[in-house]
Image (tube, grey):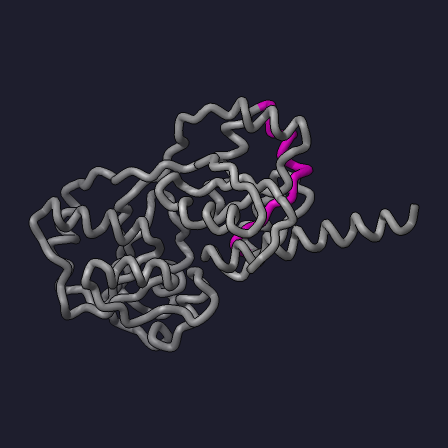
Amino acid sequence: MKNLREFTVLVTRPEDQAGHFIDMINSSNGTAINLPTIDIAASPLNDEQKKKLHNLADVNIVIFVSVNAVNYALEALKSLKMTFPENLIVAAVGPSTASALQQNNVQVDIVPESDFSSEGLLATPELDEIAGEKILIFKGQYGRELLSAELEERYADVDSIECYQRVIPNVDIKPIIKSLKAGSIDAVTATSVSSISNLFEMFGNQSKLLVDVPFVVASRRIAQFCDDYEIKHTTIADNAGDKAMLDALSELANRIISKEDDDDEEV
């Protein structure tokens, strides 16, 4: 079992996605504080998007970039009294997304082996030679364009549907500000760029309290984004999964405790 050395961890995941990770932190001798910085809501379907959904069976490959993409895409189909076609090749950005599809009886054909990101998905051999293939990507509003751009470079016919949007939740951050001022938060976890930008927007002129707290993030891209906010310490997990994030937290905790022990020896 991982030992978080009584670390207090600020978890920024959406409310409905944080429960298991919070349980893992608390079971590992840590204390999790839930501060969702993202609320997920369905994006209203316009006529063009409805037409794309009605023509879904004509697509060759469908890509889901997240669990939210799965939930809201299937919800959109249901609203149109449609079911997911069985003849499509289905790609998921990672195992959590694949599991969400499988729980809805959608067979998954393509999942990265380790790098659960757009880059990892693009590296799969199934998406290598795709010239002329019709591909539809389900994603969130203002999501990354890397997948579309790279697949078009491979001469695929690529389209997308933004089936959900990210909004800043209305939460009381006064207790978190108090804890930060007291130095009682040891780490912040973030699994998306939006979670960080929203966090700093929520804190406003108090955001300077965040920059000295170590952040554990889900990718190198998110770590680079942390640099824009002048966050001083980042630890990069292997991916955004609960286990990988907990492993990175444990690594951070052990590193900090070891440094404190070394400092004690020098006194």
Residue 99: quarter of image: bottom left
141 in the magenta segment: no
Left/right of residue 106 with respect to residue 229 in the rendered view: left
Given residues 129 and 200, the one toward you in this image is 200
- Give me the residue at 59% from left, 50% from top: 223
- Give me the residue at 25% from left, 39% from top: 43
Q: Position of residue 113 (x, y in %)?
A: 43, 72
Given residues 69 and 32, the one toward you in this image is 32
The quarter of the rendered structure image containing the C terminus is top right
Q: Position of residue 122 (x, y in %)?
A: 41, 67
Given residues 267 and 135, the one toward you in this image is 267
Residue 87: quarter of image: bottom left
The quarter of the rendered structure image containing the N terminus is bottom right
Q: Which residues are magenta?
A: 205-219
- Give me the residue at 38% from left, 66% from top: 153
Q: Position of residue 135 (x, y in %)?
A: 26, 63
Q: Position of residue 201 (x, y in %)?
A: 51, 29
Which residue lies most toward the right here? 267
Which residue lies most toward the left here? 81
Give the total number of marks visible in the rendering. 0
- Determine whether 107 is above or below 253 in the image: below
- Determine whether 11 is above or below 222 in the image: above
Left/right of residue 245 with respect to residue 76 in the rendered view: right
- Determine whether 186 is above or below 70 in the image: above
216 in the magenta segment: yes
